[in-house]
Image (spheres, grey):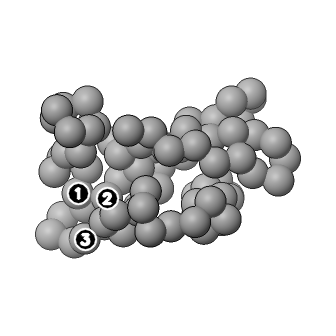
Amino acid sequence: MPREVTDGDGTTWSLVEAYAGLSEDGRSEAARIGDSERFRVIATPTGGAQSVELELPAGWADVLSDDDLVREIGAAAE
């Protein structure tokens, strides 16, 4: 299930684990980075910004705050 956050510029980002459509529960081991507890997450914006790929910890949708996710997006977009 996607999670949405809005940054300071008013851009709304929809975040979903990469390859989430490959499984019924919306999670996929295909998104796992190697043997780590980190997963590829795609952040897709509204407006003209570019999508970015993030590497976030397991459980990111539940454990990271909106501010944490906005910071991660900003760092990945640089």
Determine the image quadrant of residue 36.
bottom left
- Kindly identify the amino acid type of the residue bearing the numbered disc 1: Arg
Contact, CB < 8 Å: mark 3 with mark 1? Answer: no
Please tell me which residue is depicted at 25% across the width and 50% down the height of the picture: 31
Of the numbered discs in the image, which one, if any, rests on residue 37? 3
Does any portion of residue 76 appear in the rendered image? yes
Instruction: State the separation of the CA atoms marked 2 and 1.
Output: 4 Å
Contact, CB < 8 Å: mark 2 with mark 3? Answer: no
Of the numbered discs in the image, which one, if any, rests on residue 39? 2
Q: Quick one: 1 or 21, which is closer to the camera?
A: 1
Instruction: State the separation of the CA atoms marked 2 and 3.
Output: 7 Å
Q: Secondary structure at mark 3?
A: loop
- Give the crowd class for mark 1: few <14, some 14-19, many >=20 residues within 10 Å: many
Instruction: State the separation of the CA atoms marked 3 and 1.
Output: 7 Å
Please tell me which residue is depicted at 35% across the width and 45% down the height of the picture: 17
Of the numbered discs in the image, which one, if any, rests on residue 32? 1
- Give the crowd class for mark 3: few <14, some 14-19, many >=20 residues within 10 Å: few
- Give the crowd class for mark 2: few <14, some 14-19, many >=20 residues within 10 Å: many
Contact, CB < 8 Å: mark 2 with mark 1? Answer: yes
Q: Residue 57, image x and y in percent?
A: 36, 68
